[in-house]
Image: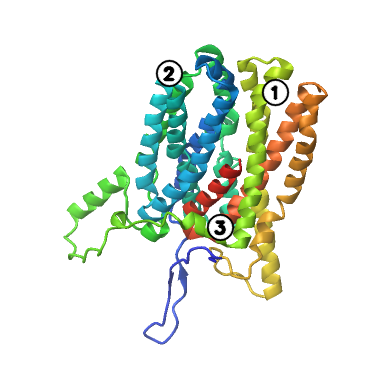
Amino acid sequence: MEKSSSTVAKVGGIDSDGSSSPLVIEPYCIFTKTKVFTIIFIVSISGMMSPLSANIYFPALNNIQKDLDITAQQVNLTVTAYMIFQGLSPAFWGSLADLWGRRPVYPITMLIYCVSCIGLALTQSYGVLLFLRMVQAFGSSSLIAIGAGVVGDIATPSERGGYYGIYTMGHLLGKRKAKIWIRLLIFLCVAGPVIGPIIGGLVTGTIGWRWIFWILLIMATVMLILLILFVPETLRSLVGNGSGYANPTPSQWFHRHKSLLSSPPAPPQVPPTRSRFLQCPNFFAPFVYLLQMDVLVALVYGGLLYSCQYAYLVSATRLLNDHYGLTTTQIGLSFIPQGVCSVIGSHIIGKFLNWSFAKAVQRYEENHQAAIVDRTQIPLDFPIYHARLRVTGPCFLAAQCITVAYGWLFHVNAPLAVPIIFQCIMAFGMAASMAGTQTLMVDLFPRHGASITASYNLIRCILG
């Protein structure tokens, strides 16, 4: 099993006078902090489309059931079908992204998603609704796996926990200098669990549930333009630390051709024997990881947490309507507290993951009486499991204790504030625990971040 990050290039040797030249370690990533922020910001709001498309749908379930004259079981089946394809699709797209690169896969998946949104907004048939929800999941769910691969490409292990907290939550790299309005903008853009039910409830309660998909179409179109223009290729097997040239952005292509016109022609190079776009990716790669027991246990652990959280989300609409008589708009607003706590949990656990990793490095160096010179690599005997998972235990216990008592609140007709508070504690604990598991998976397979995240997505969605 791959236990360390991608090897960085080192330059050094013996000079002509017999003295050794200093060892030069190239940076893990050549992008500036501003560029890293831009990349993570765009891939975060793009990855948001999958959970947003799922959560924005929940407040509209009762209205869709009445409008299409179907049963509650049929409308719930559209949720199940979405989750199945949300789990299976990244296995296909993640393998392509690890072979072709991140950039070619992004526009393909986004175009599929946009077409499905148009069909969903116009559908008058339950069968078409069910089919297009599958297509929508097929197009959107891969964005999470690819985005996680991008983060793994540009973040060192010592920074990865914090970056994944950023990726799943969306704060501005934790910089205190960031203005409040920038933090608020990113929060609103990437916090799919927060804004999804709010938008769904408000739109459904005012202009109708079909406008949910027109809004998603507009958002996806904007994301597609941002991805094409501003996110460079990051797959390390193609561009290394970002200094290579492959799948260029428009600006990269322009500067490249401008420099070629102003410089003498380079000697002809031998073309590769076979283009990577003609190679067949290993679509079974995400399933191969499941054969390793420690990886399987970690993935099932994260999957069970996700399935528990989904049980809260799917049941909330009917429970709040039946027991408290809330309207569609009020139900949408009731999702705000747990969404906010989910975002806060992702951010806080990112900070703790970095702290835990730093403490593990310090203890490792003390025990081995030597410093880890290259912080971009994780030694094979490094206690990575302990560093990543020890901070998630208390969060897991808190969430499960809440779950034990949650159902009884409705049985005894507890005040509305009580189940809302319970949902908040659950969301915080679940988000924190799942962020730790996802970071661990990329630590173990840094060169295959999209594929291993696809495995994680497969397990959690199937269990959900």
Q: Earlier in the sequence, mark 2 or mark 3?
A: 2
Q: Quadrant of residue 168?
A: top right
Rendered location of residue 53, percent (x, y)? 51, 31
Secondary element under disc 2, as helix, strand or loop, is: loop
Q: Is residue 400 visible?
A: yes
Q: Amino acid at mark 1?
A: Leu
Q: In the displayed structure, would residue 77 be above or below residue 105?
A: above
First along the sequence among labels 3 and 1:
3
Disc 2 or 1, which lies upstream in sequence? 2
Residue 186 seen = no
Q: Which residue is mark 2?
A: 124
Residue beneath disc 3: 290
Please identify the quarter of the rendering in which residue 432 is found: top right
Label 1, on which residue? Answer: 319
Q: CA distance from mark 2 to mark 1?
A: 27 Å
Task: Compare residues 186 and 108 and report the one nearer the observer.
Answer: 108
Mark 3, other Cα within 10 Å: few <14 / some 14–19 / many ≥20: some
